[in-house]
Amino acid sequence: MKVPALRCQLLFLFVFSTGQRSGATRAAHREVEFYRSQPKTMEFTPEELELPPCKYEYLDHPADVQLHAWGDNLTECFEQVAVAMYGYMTEIDKVEILDKQEIEVSSDDMQGLLFQFLDECLFVFSAEPFLIARKVVITEFDKEAFTIKATLYGEEFDLAKHPQGTEVKAITYASMQIYDNPGQHELFVIIDI
Amino acid sequence: MKQIANVAALPGIVGRSVGLPDVHSGYGFAIGNMAAFDMDNPKAVVSPGGVGFDINCGVRLLRTNLMENDVKPIKEQLAQSMFDHIPVGVGSKGIIPMTARDLEEALEMGMDWSLREGYIWAEDKEHCEEYGRMAQADPAKVSMRAKKRGLPQLGTLGAGNHYAEIQVVDEIYDKWAASKMGIEEKGQVCVMIHSGSRGFGHQVATDALVAMEKAMKRDGIDTNDRQLACARINSPEGQDYLKSMAAAANFAWVNRSSMTFLSRQAFAKMFQTSPDDLDMHVIYDVSHNIAKIEQHWVEGKLRTLLVHRKGSTRAFPPHHPLIPVDYQLTGQPVLIGGTMGTCSYVLTGTEQGMMETFGSTCHGAGRALSRAKSRRNLDYTDVLNRLEQQVEHVVLEPLGHICGCVGTGTIILEDTILGGLERMGQMVTQQLHVG
């Protein structure tokens, strides 16, 4: 929004400095008001806006639900499972990419890392910024030090726009499985609902 | 069953690891599992899994002066009014104004805060476990994350199996005990609120699990299940957990109190009168996910025990010092919530229950089918029809949710209550939900 912003600022100066209400300045006023009233959206590259294929599913469980995510590598599994969790809380297709949030987690082992990662994603939704992510991109994944840096792309949850799905109360270690072998990259995690 | 056995293997356990009649598997502990640990044993442990993620998830029952006939003609509007007043579901935010400072005070003071702010009546506290406040709560031991998660959610109902339900008394089994509770006749209208500590409690439990895992490695405690994380009661982690658990318990009591306030408002507006005139008193408020320090007789000696109740309700007998004066002769009221389409029950605690299960009973859940399975197998129109026959009005929530609750609750609850409970609690009333 760089060019329009500049233009509206110039217009504004112009309007103030003349102090007269001619037809031209009235039009300029309207233009300023229009730009001012636009919601502040972030700029995203086409690559950022591109949505990944769905590589997750929900598996039956007597009391809760098990998320199963897969991919070409472990990183993709983690990205997919986060979206799977958000997808359970609302209809993921109704979520647009208007905002982003960066997160960073660490743990002592791989299971702990998955736990912390999903817990952080849940936290970002439950408290400010109340963000629900349509897409998750892991920018750094250290498998030895067990750390992850990721960017969540989505928007603030809005009851008027997003249908209410099922609330996720917590992440659990129950039946957690993480496979990172040639030809098999998938994980299973149960979330408490 | 394996879970109950794993719990029985924990250090410092006193007596048996009890599975209540509606037991089903959970994380670490089963849901519907009670286990007591000896406070005087230095090796005894405290386990967040034994309390549950939803700390102080519990049930509160309010009475009213209204009868079924008063409510029937305006059933839909009344249900809608409740729905409008009480925020519910994923992403809902509380409408009672709260700042971070208010939250700190509420965590420390529990229902005393609600009383100070004018949300509850003084006598509400009397009819609540722990009088609505656990003194050992220490908000300083609660993480910033938990507080951030909790603040926007205070005063909301939650989702899943939580509800605020308008009920009608269907059957009275013990007239004397019922009248002591303020339930005079069949057809009387009551309100039951089932809710917990929301994201706050979940975060407290999660934080504690993580902290205790590290402590277990350090203290060399080994258990059969990663989710059965625990710490010595007297260790810093154990003590921190008990203090933050108490804060979460206070949060849940404040939450139920806020919803009590909102329900009273909803009714008052609907009937153009005041909650006082409707005599909307709290009958009782029980907790079914909590750990309490209690004294019990074990082999003839009075011992101080840390009793974990997960999916298990306290049920103390008559003359117990911890129950309110009003119920000294009847015994503590035990509220067992039903699910949509099934009844809820009010019981009183018994001596036998006290001896066998340290005064604990079930909490009224248990699933025959998973929610997803019931969603698939039960056609939603059937479910709605069945509900309509029973209750004649259904507020349409996300359909999947309705299917989940009805399909699963029906069989188990009836069997549980009618079959196993005479020993642990005597039936007082059976309530059918109306809206």
Image (cartoon, coloured by chain):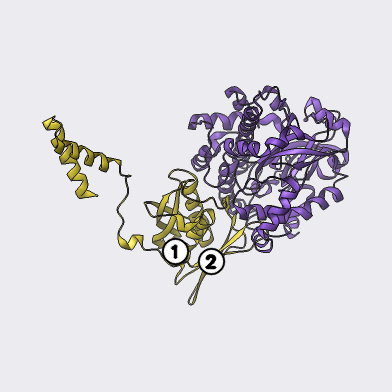
Colour in which chain A is shown?
yellow
Mark 2 surroundings: few (<14), some (14-19) or many (≥20) residues within 10 A: many
- Asked whether B57 or B76 is in front, the reply is B76
- Asked whether B322 or B153 is in front, the reply is B153
The answer for how far apart the CA atoms under marks 1 and 2 are is 18 Å
The picture quadrant where one finds residue B131 is top right
Residue drawn 82% across the image and 48% down it: B417
Name the residue beneath numbered marker 1: A144
Q: Is residue B125 left or right of residue B255?
A: right
Chain of the residue on which disc 2 is drawn: A
Give how far across and how far down residue B173 sits, in percent.
88, 38
Name the residue beneath numbered marker 2: A187
Mark 1 surroundings: few (<14), some (14-19) or many (≥20) residues within 10 A: few
**Taking B390 as reference, is A53 above or below it?**
below
Do pointers 1 and 2 mark residues of a single chain?
Answer: yes
Direction left: furthest residue: A18
Chain of the residue on which disc 1 is drawn: A
**Amino acid type, label 2:** Leu
Colour in which chain B is shown?
purple
Q: Is residue B215 left or right of residue B383?
A: left
